Image (spheres, helix red, strand yellow):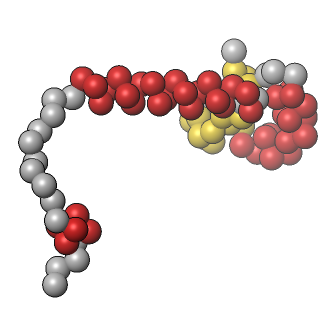
Amino acid sequence: MEEAVSAADANRKFSVLLRGVRSGRSYVVTSHGRPVARIIPAAKREDVASGARDALFARLEKQTLIEAGPWTREELYGNDP
């Protein structure tokens, strides 16, 4: 479970938060009551990245393919002669 901490408190108590992260805790940093960032252990970051990648691939696999035909370099990069 993530603990909510205000941005001001996170700024004042950053070293305390880092100690908590080293022991496996996670924090959600809020600004005006809204979540703006997460502070999580580095090992968990890899899990988050792989989960996001898996979700993206699953979404792409569900999309239908369109036949766009070949593109020229100029069309791709917008380099009109």
Residue 77, placed above or below residue 31: below
Tell me which residue sits at (35%, 23%) in the image: 58
Quadrant where the N terminus sits is top right
In the rendered structure, the answer to whether residue 73 lies left or right of residue 38 reads left
Vertical comparison of 77 with 11: above or below: below
Picture quadrant of residue 2: top right
Across and down, in percent, residue 56 comes to 39, 30
Q: Residue at x 9, y 42 (%)?
A: 67
Q: In which quadrant of the rendered image does the C terminus lie?
A: bottom left
Residue drawn at the location 76% of the way across and 45% of the way down: 8
Relative to 10, 72 lies left or right: left
Q: In this rendering, does residue 68 appear at all?
A: yes
Residue 30: x and y in percent read 64, 37
Give residue 68's position: percent from left, percent from top.
10, 48
Name the one closer to the observer, 13 or 40: 40
What number of labels is visible?
A: 0
Q: Residue furthest bottom?
A: 81
Q: Is residue 27 visible?
A: no
Which quarter of the picture shows residue 40? top right
- Give the camera-side residue of 29 and 24: 24
2 displayed left or right of 57: right
Q: Farthest top residue?
A: 1
Q: Does 57 sit above or below residue 66?
A: above
53 or 28, nearer to the observer? 53
Image point (80%, 46%), residue name = 11
